[in-house]
Image (cartoon, helix red, strand yellow):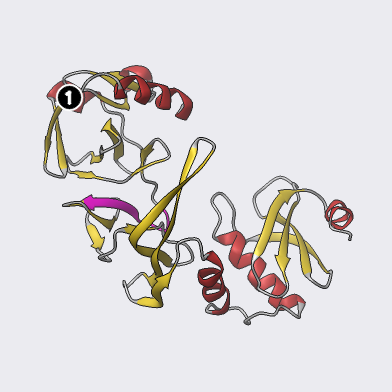
Amino acid sequence: MKRALLTLLLVFSVSAGAAETCFYPSKQDDGSYDHFDACGLIEGDQIKLAKAHAENVLFNEHGLACVIMSPADTFYIHDSGRSQRVYFYDNGCDYFKEGLARGLVDGEMVFINPALDTVLAPGFELISHFNYGHSVVCNGPFEEEKHGEHTFLTGGKCGLIDKQGDLVVEARYKIEDRDVFQTYLNTHNHCPPPPVTSENSALCHAKRHVSNMDYQTGEWKRHTISDQGEIWIITFVEVDEPDEELTLILQSASAQWDSLIKESHDEALQRTKY
């Protein structure tokens, strides 16, 4: 679906400024994104769909649908009739993570909830998704680096905020200085701070990381753990899942995770031998 949507967006991008052209999940196409004309009008940071389109939009289980007029004009609409301009991300509307997505209000990046209320306006040019209850926030100037088809920002002055919007790491680091933010998150939580020297500490950090991942939980019906000096190897099977083993590699010095892949404990031990 994302590949098809990207193709449609590329087609759209060369159709000169048809401001009313849009893409959205359509009832008539069983929820597939489709291309439509005469969609409606943009009013500031909201969109007003024409009646025929408003009746054709297929909302998700949260009562939301993504309407894309262009990468710069991307909106969530709610089945209540509300709408909000949002950050264009991964060929669509920004994801909700930890209950919040990134919206745009008068050109400023803010956090919105699924009801499309603005719940936090950090006051920075660039904000990341919340992760472990914290967001990396940055002001420019930035530089762009091309890696294949992807463009990455570097530079700037970045810090870390909590969900109250308070800076817990001063905004003075470059956006690529991720280790600074990971160190804070790995040392300010309910687990013993690194270095990880015991099984209980390793399990605590492993479950913390896994619980923060999409489609994973920290509810395990069994696990196996091995101390390999520089790393810990933790293999587990989740509750309410088939007996499929997943193995997480945890760095002893930092409590940061390296990888999570489908493999047995013995396979992981063999793979990580020096």
State how many labels appear: 1
x and y, in percent, of residue 257 in the image: 66, 63
x and y, in percent, of residue 34 in the image: 33, 20
Left or right: where does residue 273 sit relative to residue 175? right
Q: Quadrant of residue 135?
A: bottom left
Task: Say above or below: 6 vs 180.
Answer: above
Task: Say above or below: 173 vs 154.
Answer: below
- Span highlighted in magenta in the image: 97-104
Near-viewer residue (203 or 70):
70
Q: Does the magenta stretch include residue 235?
A: no
**Residue positioned 28% across, 66% down in the render:** 122
Q: In which quarter of the image is residue 217?
A: bottom right
Q: Is residue 98 magenta?
A: yes
Q: Name the residue under label 1.
A: 20
Near-viewer residue (73 or 201):
73
x and y, in percent, of residue 260 in the image: 69, 53
The amino acid on which the numbered mark 1 sits, given as a three-letter code, is: Glu
**Residue 115 in sight in this render:** no
For label 1, the SS is loop
Q: Quadrant of residue 26?
A: top left
x and y, in percent, of residue 274 in the image: 89, 61
Task: Say above or below: 123 vs 26.
Answer: below
Left or right: where does residue 120 sit relative to residue 230? left
**Residue positioned 35% across, 25% down in the render:** 9
**Residue positioned 32% across, 17% down in the render:** 28
Left or right: where does residue 140 sit relative to residue 204? left
Q: Residues within 10 Å of mark 1 (few under 14, many from 20)?
A: some
